[in-house]
Amino acid sequence: MALILTAGALWLVAALVVTSRRGLALGGAARVALVVTGVPYLGWVTYGLGPLAGLGGLLIGAAVLMRCRLPRLTGRGLRD
């Protein structure tokens, strides 16, 4: 259980660093890497700690990744 929580804390720190750096050149690729590594981690959490912990991890991960400012889609295209 300690290994699962340690891995989750490392993922959370990495996600907070990536989403806090708005001028990061690799921001999009870093976010994709966080999603690609986060999905198997959520499976691991759900398997090891149960479905409620998996749901909690999903909600926390989604909240952290949605902190970044995404362009809004308007009728005429993308706008900041």
Image (cartoon, rainbow, N blue to C red):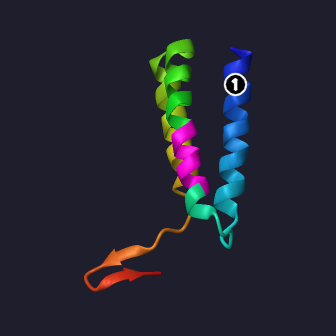
The answer to whether residue 47 is magenta is no
Residue linked to disc 1: 5
Asked where in the image residue 2 lies, by quadrant, the reply is: top right
Looking at the image, residue 44 lies above or below residue 41: above
Query: At numbered mark 1, what does the secondary structure look like: helix, strand or loop?
Result: helix
Counting from the top left corner in percent of width and height, residue 70 is at: 48, 68
Q: Is residue 32 a member of the stretch shown in magenta?
A: yes
Which x, y percent locates residue 9? 72, 34
In the image, 51: left or right of 7?
Answer: left
**Type of amino acid under label 1:** Leu
Q: Which residues are magenta?
A: 30-37
Q: Residue furthest bottom?
A: 76
**Residue at left offset 40%, top offset 74%:** 72
Find residue 11 and report its image quarter: top right
Q: Measured along the vertical axis of the image, is residue 27 above or below residue 49?
A: below
Tell me which secondary structure the magenta stretch mostly adopts: helix
Residue at 73% x, 37% y is 10
